[in-house]
Amino acid sequence: MIRLRTVASTGLLVLVVLLVLPPFLMLLVGSFWGGAPGAPGQISLRSYIQAYTSPHTYQVLLNSILISFSKTCLAVVWGVVLAWLVTRTDVPFRRTMEVLIPVPFFIPALFTTFAWILLANPHNGLVNQVLTRVFGPEFSPFNIYSYGGIIFVMALGSTSFVYILTFGAFRGLDPALEEAARACGAGWDKTFVRITLPLVAPALLGASILSFIRGIEAFEGPVLLGTPVGIYVFTNEIYRAITFYDPPQYGVATALGMTVILITFILVFIQWCILGERQYFTITGKGYNPHTIRLRGWRWPAFCVFALYFLLAVVFPVGQLVASSFQRTVGVYGLELMTLDNYRRAFSEEIVLRALQNTLILAIAASSLGVLLSALIAYVTTRTQFWGRRLMELISWLPWTMPGIVLAVGMLWAYLSIPGLSVFYGTLGILLIAFVMKGLPLGVRALSGTIVQVDRELEDCARVHGATWMQTFWSIMLYLIRPGMVAGGMLFAYITVRDLSTPVLLYGYGTEVLSIAMLQFWAESKPQIVSVLAVVMLLLLMILSGAQRWLLIKGEPLEESEAPVDKEVAGQLTGT
Amino acid sequence: MAVVTVHNLRKAFGRVQAVNGVSFEVEEGELVTLLGESGCGKTTTLRLIAGLEENDEGEIILRGEVVSDPARSKFFPPEKRKIGMVFQSYAIWPHMTVFENVAFPLRIRRLPSAEIRKRVGEVLAMLGLKDLASRLATRLSGGQQQRVAIARALACDPAILLMDEPLSNLDAKLRERMRFELRELQRRFGIATLYVTHDQAEAMVLSDRIIVMKDGHVEQVGTPQEIYECPQSQFVSDFIGMANLMTGEVIEWEEGLCRLLISGNSRELIMYAKKGSNSGPVLVLIRPENVEVNEAEELPSENTWPALVEVGAYFGDHREYILRDGNISIRVKTGPRVILKRGEVVAVHIPRESPVLVGHGF
Ligand SMILES: Nc1ncnc2c1ncn2[C@@H]1O[C@H](COP(=O)(O)OP(=O)(O)OP(=O)(O)O)[C@@H](O)[C@H]1O
Ligand SMILES: [Mg+2]
């Protein structure tokens, strides 16, 4: 017997398939095609042969792994030490640290990267200027355009990410386990290495793998810091293959893209094997374990670990961009040189107004469409017996394996070569589809996590008392999962506002977004305008997070106001 | 005409046959209980009737209308069945006030708002919830939540009320009081009710009729008295109340009487019983409160056996002892003043009218 519910679920499945599969399949087809999208070609291994006979590709592979691995190590050590300090020791200002360490995680990679270019470029980087003034003109040690620079900038966001992912594991640890070790005569250093670390090892390993995946997928750092000096990883290499050559090397780009997807698949698989059931956790929680470890003389040195991190990840970058947005010439700073000219100039540029408008439209549209779609998918996959629910879950997860730039290549292929879809090309529509798709895996997870917590009888009760399936969804379910809806909606908005890698291949004249405008002004060597736009982007994100808090507090009849957040939800936000 | 008729209902979850050929009826104004052990399929039966699950086989007829019959590809979704239901967790919607919770079924049916206000007001008044109308539903005690759930189920005048262990979330004292209150309420509304519980005392107090279920099928249907006094199977006699069960061999039938040889202690038992066809082994049930304990001097006389006192316990209003005779242990209930010593030998007297033959008909 055919029910309306089955029909609706099937319709949803078709929609998800149509949304997700074309870029994915066309990327696969494209990698064997040989021709440009939409142009004639024939199935062959040519692209793979071309890509994998070039020694450059192996350099790219090596670079990707090396850079991502190094920054993961740095971030894990830093993040774990911070998490341990905050949860297990008597370091000063623990409460403040607990609130401040997650902050860098919400600052876009684009923002931090631009800031650090201005801070540590070899010509007029502020840090170098200060050092030359102190130690003499030969002393200008920092060059951000280097392996070290890329790793450093990427590690800043990742540290906060690792901290957030391991914080819960550290805090959940029973202090008695450590006290027992202390009673046996182990010092706090031995206790940390022999007891604490092994106990949090699963969480740590999970966080490391996620951080590594995000490192492979990162775009902003490599393209801004690596490309100018010829350091290539997968993401900026794919970007180069398409934008620097004429005609664009679509074949190589897709072949490399498929490689990244494969790597991600394997890593995600390993991560699932390790984490198993422990996928959900809460970012913020209540209660506070009594600290166990007295650092004594090490208290202030330990605090400096935090202070250094916060300076490098937040104070310096934000200070630099805010300062340079008010200065006439970047590299020359002074209070008496303060000016609003940059803002005046930025907002008289047509492209800035357009980008701002487009970003807002896309953020609103992507978050409302995305969260609704996620809610429906999460509902069907967790609450119904629909035959295609496993398939739907799998497909909605697929974009997770695609870095923004690869997703964009897939979209290009699909929307240029499939007849009928090409009308979307160069419109806001294609960007909207891309952002919804990019947020989908995390959106669905955030909402599934909320939906499974809703008692089934609350729904059954509505059905029995006369509400149809749809009415129940609208009048009961949507209210009960509001925390998840707000979190999910913000997720889509965050991604839309801060992402560069997805729109960079998909925008056209008239559909620029904020990150694209920043890139363009950067290419035009107008760092003051870039600073202005970066500040605007940061303000936008702050408004969003304020709005999220307000929405959660305002419409919250339930006692618990903290939606469970998936590790991977956190992962996506850093973009590093 | 019965309000609910269920015929040969079956439902499997994968390999688990949760409901396996259940048939029964609920009449106008009647309160019928589904009673059985955990996992026997009570909740599933209720959900099948509500339409929250789909039966694999069998018919469900509500007020003469077939609402589910897979053989004819017929299935009414829950919202088309016009029932009221109280869930085990109460399922009070936390984002609505008490008033809105109760008004929900009426709003869904698009009644004019004046009528909704009137009807909800009436129901709330009936249940003593008038003052709580504007309270957020989550800020209520367990007992109040339960009342709200009942009010909501009754709001749109359903022909049948389904309740799934509505008292199991309340503390013991409140639960006992609510039994009588529920019974009273059901009488007042005169609504046919199907009530699920695993608590036999609750079933006894509440029910007009009890349906005893086991492993997805119906063991016995009857009034509480019938179920207690004339159980039709070993399971029912054991499940309801306390029971001494013995096997025996029929020696002879006299008019209205049956002479038996009890297997465990090879003694004779004479009891009232209509002549049945069974001549082989029979199962005899004797309730502990129907056994008399006397001094050992009474021996020997009819239906009087010597027995050794094994254990005793004091319950305040009565005492219970476990006595042994041969391979048979006999549980007896005595007044609180009857004190038997451990190891003492007493005479157990079983009046002719006490024993019943299990599965022998009424
Ligand atoms: N949705 C389901 N999926 C799989 N099996 C189920 C499902 N619902 C019930 N069952 C199984 O069907 C059987 C009957 O379950 P049901 O909930 O009807 O028992 P019950 O009599 O209500 O028990 P209780 O007194 O514990 O509530 C059980 O073995 C149960 O495990
Ligand atoms: Mg049950």
Image (spheres, coloured by chain):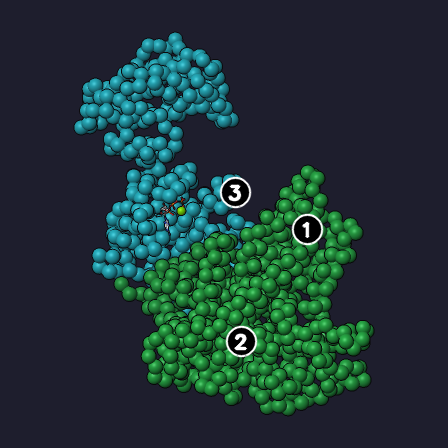
Which amino acid, mark 2? Answer: Asn
Q: Quadrant of residue A474?
A: bottom left
Tag 1's secondary structure? helix
Tag 3's secondary structure? loop
Which label sits in the foreground, 1 or 3?
A: 1
Which amino acid, mark 1? Answer: Arg
Chain hosting mark 3: B
Picture residue at 40% right of the left edge, 38% below the top: B200
Chain hosting mark 2: A
What separation in Å lies between label 1 and label 3 (alpha carbons)?
A: 41 Å
Q: Nearer the viewer, residue A239 or A279?
A: A239
The numbered disc on residue B171 is 3
Residue identifier under label 1: A88
Expressed as whole percent of the image width and height from the top left, the position of residue B238 reads: 35, 32
Expressed as whole percent of the image width and height from the top left, the position of residue A217 reads: 52, 69
Using a 10 Å C-alpha cutoff, classify the residue at mark 3 as few (fewer than 14 neighbours), some (14 to 19) or many (20 or more): few
Q: Which chain is cyan?
A: B
